[in-house]
Image (spheres, grey):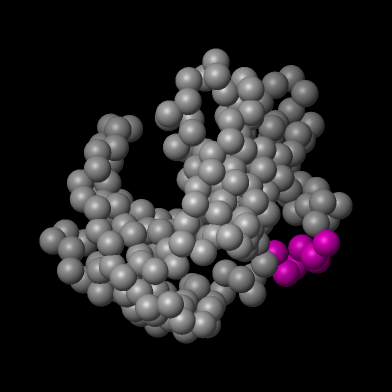
Amino acid sequence: MRILGVDFGTTSIKAVELDSAFGRYEIHGYHERPVPITSPEERIQTCAEGLHELIMGLVRKPDRIVISLPTGATTLRNLLLPTKDKKAIQSSVAFELEDELHFPTEQLVQDYCVLGQTRQGSYLHVAATLKKRLEPWLNALEAAHVSPDVVTTEAWALRALVSRLVPAAAREEPTLLLHCGHERTVLYVQLGDAPFTAREIAW
């Protein structure tokens, strides 16, 4: 399976082609396409059109497209729920977020991953964003004839990186990853296998 992972940067779109087979991943190619610095509204459209052009220039079209939302547009929580039942977990996540966030749940889009299970229940990583932050991206991508298969968060992507680079024994203590971009800096902290916090600084 050919997977295209996309990062919408301030000055360019970065994309990595991965081949996935038998649970292993191999980097096939790296691509970067510059985008002009414009207003936030124009940037969304410009990035969507730029990604379409990038994909059309590939030798092989991707089977799956993965994009991530910027840290400043998302929030994360780690929850311990006293159940292992999948349906009970699904129905409980939104309820638990009501006490954690200042927004009505009907304004949110959220998803979760089970990090582990014990006799006490299930330990979850939950990511959420406002619909009004996600919908402009999806609408612009649809207009540019690009349909992402996965929308993830920077924190979850950085978790995958830290989990591969830092030995498990070392992750028993907090690990800080600092990502300095053109206009913003992301501070990501991981404890064990779980994202602990992620913050975006406009600097």
x and y, in percent, of residue 94 in the image? 75, 54
| Magenta-span inclusion, residue 21 | no
Query: Vertical placement of 166 versus 62: above or below?
Result: above
Where on the picture, by quarter, is residue 148?
bottom left
Identify the residue shown where x is 41% and y is 59%: 7
Total marks placed: 0
Q: Relative to 103, is 179 on the left or the right?
A: left
> Residue 81, image x and y in percent?
77, 35
Q: Is residue 19 left or right of residue 180?
A: left
Q: Quadrant of residue 15?
A: bottom left
| Span of residues in magenta | 102-110
Q: Position of residue 172 (x, y in %)?
A: 62, 20
Residue reaching furthest left? 59
The residue closer to the viewer here, 7 or 91, is 7
Q: Say which quadrant the C terminus sits in.
A: bottom right
Q: Is residue 169 left or right of residue 102?
A: left
Q: Between residues 168 and 10, which one lies in front from this camera angle?
A: 10
Q: Residue at x 48, y 30 (%)?
A: 163
Q: Nearer the viewer, residue 111 or 152?
A: 152
Outermost top residue:
169
Let me know if residue 107 is in the magenta part: yes
Q: Residue furthest front?
A: 203
Viewer can see residue 110: no
